[in-house]
Each structure stands twice: as structure tokens, then as C-alpha cells.
Image: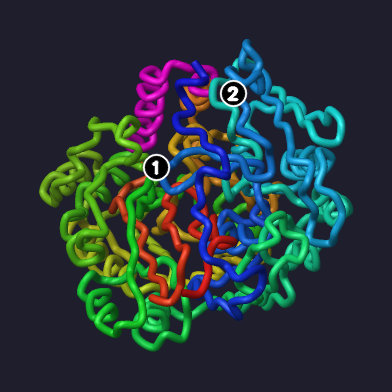
């Protein structure tokens, strides 16, 4: 069972080809630009990709995924399986054997105590861990000497690779974070902004929502890596400026997430300084539909909480009509070209997990959407806006500031007006929107709007943990410091029970059937409305070697192997 699930587990030595490095810290400075600026370097306090990926240069998991979605060890000696004895025959536990040659960047040994502490940190009930779904079903994490860790689950767990695998679930140092556990996690600014790590680089300066400076880790496990002595990691601006900075001016070496129209990318490439790179994983641009009331008339701490159902989006007919009114083919054409595909699923890949039960969304149906609303009793007023029992369908639609997303907003506002829906548009600086500040009213987790649009994905090729994002316990609120992946506040006990079944199912075909059913429950409830299956589009300088685009983990997963040509 388990051996069939993990296809292509490889050793670290088989993954990388050795570049012609002159040695550690011999290639000067590499400059990276993420136009969504990191707000923290602690991915347990933010689910934002910008925060997870910038942190991945510093702190690492026991294992991660390569560019083909294959799992490989990083801080562990090997990936545990039933065949090698690391996973128990009854599938209730997994035992990791750690490398014994790893040092933290402060020179102290990396041990099993750090791994156990990381679990305790994330699983603390008052910590508001953004990655809690990775630890679903875990009942205990035990040290077995300095270099072994046993994770026990509450039942047979055929896919036990949620904890400590991938860029979203790295190991943090116990000595640095042990006074930051629980409700005080957000207050440990020094640790959150400058984590001690095992990765190739060490933070020397962090300006939130602006810039990070790093230097080569003197204690990194490969004495010849990283090739670069320094990193300048710039955040902010927009995708256009980021693309130009690499492909036209050559000011930067790597630009992430070039969410730009295809013709814009082509013109930039003509600058001759850089090369765009792209690949498809499970990244989906989508709407999250708020099932709770975000009205500012409610007391702070009660807005967008399950205490108050949404006044009109609680009606599935309204949610369905919003989806039916969208022309996804046009969105793909104007926004992404060949870097986009049509999808009606939140899990569009790998192919084995992609459902075909929701394909009616592929064709826009304005007339059908109007008919749905008519039948549900939502009548147009004199201003053309539909209402029922004194409640108007007036939507606050928020997203991050980005040229493609603002184009989408304009189009969708027009389509929704054709079905009698009033729409107010709001765009928020991406560094704030995707940040984890519990005091900010503008984060996507707090969701003080009716619908919000962004893209999300998952590490690896198995969607178990990802689909676990929408169990009831993942709903964010004041009690979790507004952390939690179930941002639309979807809660269905049947969904929770089916996800539990997925965690206990080993047969690949049956896992695919269950995963599709979970996807379909979300789609057919219109809790999530998918828009575009997006390819990742980034760019690197022609002088930068070693870059391998990875759509299954952090894009910076192999930054230790980058070098100057």
C-alpha cells in the first residue's frame, strides 16, 4: 500500500548535478525579487506563499519534493516507508532517522528535540498555526535518542508525510522558539524575522514588507555551497516591475510569480537579459466565498465568524449564479494565455485526482444564472440590483493589487451586473493581504469581504493535507489569532468524515475517488469557485545557473545549487 503511494522517492545525491562551483561564498551576491513582500520568516504564522518560500532559504523540512513531485530526504537520512521499516506495518506511525551531521547556523547540533518541539509549537491550541492541517491525526511526536523521531497517528495513515515534509512544514530551532509557544507566538519578532536555520543562508537584516538580506551559512552541510556569499531578497512593487528587473534591465537575478499577460512577457524577454520559465502544478486562481457575515456593523471579533451566517451568500443559489456568470475561457485568454488552463476544480492536478463532475462551469451561462436567481426569489429592484426580504446582493470583492487581477475584477463586475449583482471592488497591497498580522483588517484569513480572489496550491502530488484545509477545525477566528486555512468558513461534518476516510485509505484508486469526492463537495457547494488553472511563471537572469523550477514545493527549494555562470 504505502510503497505504491510514494513513487520515485530518491536520495539527495541522485538529485543534483554538481555545478562547477569554486567554493562556498565565491559568486558574490544574488538578487531575488518577489513583488509580494514577505511579512514574516515563520511559515507557521502565515500561509502566504511569499513567506513560506523566503523562509525556505533558511529553515528546512526533513524531506521535500523535487521538480517531478518525487520525495527526497533533506534533514533525514532517508524517506521512511513500509519497505525500509520506517513506517509501521499497521500504518499508525512513521519513524524518521535524522542526519547526524547537521548543524544549526549558530553552530549547535540539529537533533530530534528540535523536530518534536516543532510539532509541539504548531499543535499548541493557542498558537494559531497556519500549517495545522499538516499535523492532522497526529496523537504524539516522540524522540527516540538524538537522531530519531516517531510520529504516531490516531489510526492507520497510508500517507504519513504531512508533518515535516515540504516547504510549508519546516523545522524550527527549539532553543530559539521555546519561549514563543502558544499565544505568545506572534510576539516573538526577533525569532520570527530572523530564524536560526539549517538552510544555505542566514538572515542578516529583515525589513517587513520590504527587503531581506542574507549571507551564506558558514555551518551549511555542504562545504562547497552555497556559491553565493550574499542574498538581497527584495519585496514589493508589482509583477511588471519585477519582470523588467530581470529580463530587461538585469537589475535582479530571479523574479517570482510573473502574473502578467503573455504579450507582456514576450516583450520583456526581448530585452535579452533573462529567460521566463513556467510549469504546471496544482495552482488555481479562485474565489473564496464567505459563508459568514463580514459587516463592519458587527463588533470586532464577531465579523466573519461562524456566529453570524452571511446574509445572502448562505443561499447556494446566489453562489451558484455567481459561478455561472463567469467566462473562464476569456479569463484564461486575457490573463495567462498558454500559462493558463480552464478548470472547474480546486484540485486540477495531478491528473489522477482531477474530477470531471463539475465541467459545466467551463461555459458561461448568464441566462441560466438569471434563471437560478429568479427561481430562488431574488428580484431586481428599480436600480437593477436583486434583493429578497430586504437584503440586497451587494458584494465587496477583494483581492491583491496586481494588473491581471484588476483586469479580472473589472470583467467579473460587469458579468455580475448582468445578473443583478452589485459589486464593489477592493484591492490590497499583496504583502498585507497575504500577511499574517492578526491586527490587520485586510488579510485574506480575516476576510472582511464577501468574496476574495487569489491563487493557492499544495506541496507534493498528494492532496490529502490540502483537502484537509477545509475541515471545520481549520476555520480561523479570534481564538486562533485569525490563522487557519479554511478562510471561507466552510463546515460540513460529512466532508470532515470523508477526509478522515482519505487519511486511512491506502489504495491509490480509492484515494483518487475519495479526493475527487471531496473536491466535488467544495465545488458543488460553491464554497470555492475556481477560475483558472495557472502555470507558475517566473524568470531568471541568463547569467544565473542551477535554477530548476519546482511547481510541487518552494520555487527556492534548490537555491543552495544556484551559481553565477
Q: Distance between the residues labelled 1 and 2?
A: 36 Å
Left or right of residue 432: residue 206: right
Residue visible at 73% across and 32% down in the picture: 97
Residue visible at 81% across and 47% down in the picture: 110
Q: Which of marks 1 and 2 is nearer the N terminus?
A: 2
Q: How crowded is mark 1: few (under 14 residues within 10 Å), some or many (20 or more)?
A: many
**Residue 176: x and y, percent?**
85, 57
Left or right of residue 68: residue 234: right
**Residue 514: x and y, percent?**
40, 23
Magenta highlight on residue 516: yes
Comparing 300 with 532, the one in front is 532
Outermost residue toward the top in this view: 90
Q: How crowded is mark 2: few (under 14 residues within 10 Å), some or many (20 or more)?
A: many
Residue visible at 33% across and 51% down in the picture: 280
Outermost residue toward the left in this view: 367
Picture quadrant where residue 37 is located:
bottom right
Is 544 above or below relative to 358? below
- Judged from the image, the secondary structure of the residue bearing numbered disc 1 is loop
According to the picture, the residue beneath numbered tag 1 turns out to be 527
Mark identifier at residue 81: 2
Q: What stretch is highlighted in magenta?
A: 501-525
Q: Which of marks 1 and 2 is in front?
A: 2
Outermost residue toward the bottom in this view: 249
Amino acid at each position: 500500500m504505502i510503497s505504491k503511494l510514494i513513487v520515485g522517492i530518491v536520495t539527495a545525491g541522485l538529485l543534483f548535478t554538481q555545478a562547477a562551483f569554486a567554493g562556498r561564498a565565491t559568486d558574490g551576491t544574488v538578487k531575488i525579487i518577489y513583488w509580494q513582500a514577505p511579512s514574516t520568516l515563520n511559515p507557521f504564522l502565515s500561509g502566504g506563499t511569499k513567506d513560506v518560500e523566503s523562509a525556505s532559504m533558511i529553515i528546512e523540512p526533513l524531506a521535500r519534493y523535487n521538480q517531478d513531485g518525487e520525495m527526497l530526504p533533506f534533514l533525514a537520512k532517508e524517506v521512511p516507508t513500509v519497505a525500509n521499516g520506517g513506517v509501521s506495518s499497521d500504518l499508525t506511525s512513521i519513524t524518521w532517522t535524522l542526519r547526524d551531521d547537521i548543524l544549526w547556523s549558530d553552530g549547535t547540533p540539529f537533533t530530534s528535540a528540535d523536530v518534536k518541539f516543532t510539532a509541539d509549537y504548531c499543535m499548541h491550541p493557542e498558537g494559531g498555526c497556519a500549517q495545522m492541517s499538516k499535523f492532522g491525526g497526529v496523537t504524539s511526536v516522540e524522540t527516540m535518542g538524538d537522531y530519531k523521531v516517531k510520529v504516531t497517528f490516531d489510526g492507520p495513515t497510508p500517507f504519513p508525510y504531512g508533518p515535516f515534509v515540504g516547504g510549508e512544514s519546516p523545522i524550527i530551532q527549539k532553543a530559539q522558539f521555546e519561549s514563543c509557544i502558544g499565544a505568545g507566538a506572534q510576539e516573538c519578532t526577533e525569532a520570527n524575522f530572523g530564524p536560526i536555520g539549517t538552510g544555505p543562508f542566514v538572515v542578516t537584516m529583515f525589513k517587513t514588507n520590504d527587503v531581506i538580506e542574507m549571507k551564506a551559512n558558514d555551518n551549511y552541510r555542504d562545504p562547497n555551497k552555497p556559491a553565493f556569499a550574499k542574498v538581497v531578497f527584495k519585496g514589493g512593487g508589482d509583477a511588471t516591475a519585477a519582470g523588467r528587473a530581470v529580463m530587461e534591465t538585469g537589475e535582479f537575478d530571479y523574479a517570482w510569480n510573473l502574473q502578467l499577460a503573455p504579450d507582456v512577457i514576450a516583450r520583456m524577454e526581448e530585452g535579452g537579459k533573462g529567460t521566463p520559465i513556467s510549469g504546471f502544478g496544482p495552482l488555481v486562481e479562485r474565489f473564496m466565498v464567505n459563508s459568514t457575515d463580514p459587516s463592519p456593523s458587527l463588533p470586532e471579533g464577531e465579523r466573519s465568524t461562524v456566529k453570524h451566517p452571511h446574509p445572502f451568500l448562505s443561499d447556494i443559489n446566489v453562489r451558484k449564479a455567481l459561478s455561472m456568470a463567469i467566462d473562464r475561457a476569456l479569463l484564461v485568454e486575457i490573463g495567462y494565455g498558454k500559462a493558463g488552463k480552464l478548470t472547474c476544480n480546486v484540485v486540477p492536478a495531478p491528473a489522477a485526482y482531477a474530477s470531471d463532475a463539475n465541467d459545466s462551469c467551463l461555459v458561461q451561462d448568464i441566462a441560466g444564472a438569471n434563471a437560478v436567481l429568479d427561481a430562488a426569489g431574488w428580484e431586481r429592484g428599480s436600480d437593477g440590483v436583486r434583493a429578497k426580504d430586504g437584503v440586497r446582493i451587494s458584494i465587496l470583492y477583494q483581492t491583491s493589487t496586481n494588473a491581471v487581477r484588476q483586469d479580472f475584477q473589472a470583467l467579473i463586475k460587469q458579468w455580475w451586473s448582468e445578473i443583478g449583482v452589485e459589486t464593489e471592488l477592493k484591492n490590497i497591497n499583496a504583502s498585507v493581504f497575504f500577511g499574517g498580522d492578526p491586527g490587520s483588517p485586510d488579510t485574506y484569513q480575516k476576510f472582511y469581504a464577501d468574496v476574495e480572489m487569489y491563487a493557492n496550491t499544495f506541496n507534493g502530488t498528494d492532496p490529502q493535507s490540502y483537502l484537509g484545509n477545509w475541515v471545520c477545525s481549520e476555520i480561523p477566528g479570534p481564538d486562533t489569532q485569525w490563522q487557519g486555512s479554511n478562510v471561507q468558513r466552510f463546515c460540513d461534518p460529512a466532508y470532515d468524515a470523508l477526509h478522515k476516510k482519505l487519511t486511512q485509505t491506502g489504495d491509490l484508486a480509492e484515494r483518487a475517488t475519495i479526493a475527487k469526492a471531496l473536491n466535488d463537495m467544495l465545488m458543488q457547494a460553491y464554497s470555492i469557485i475556481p477560475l483558472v488553472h495557472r502555470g507558475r511563471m517566473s524568470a531568471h537572469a541568463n547569467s544565473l545557473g542551477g535554477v530548476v523550477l519546482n511547481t510541487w514545493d518552494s520555487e527556492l527549494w534548490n537555491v543552495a545549487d544556484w551559481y553565477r555562470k
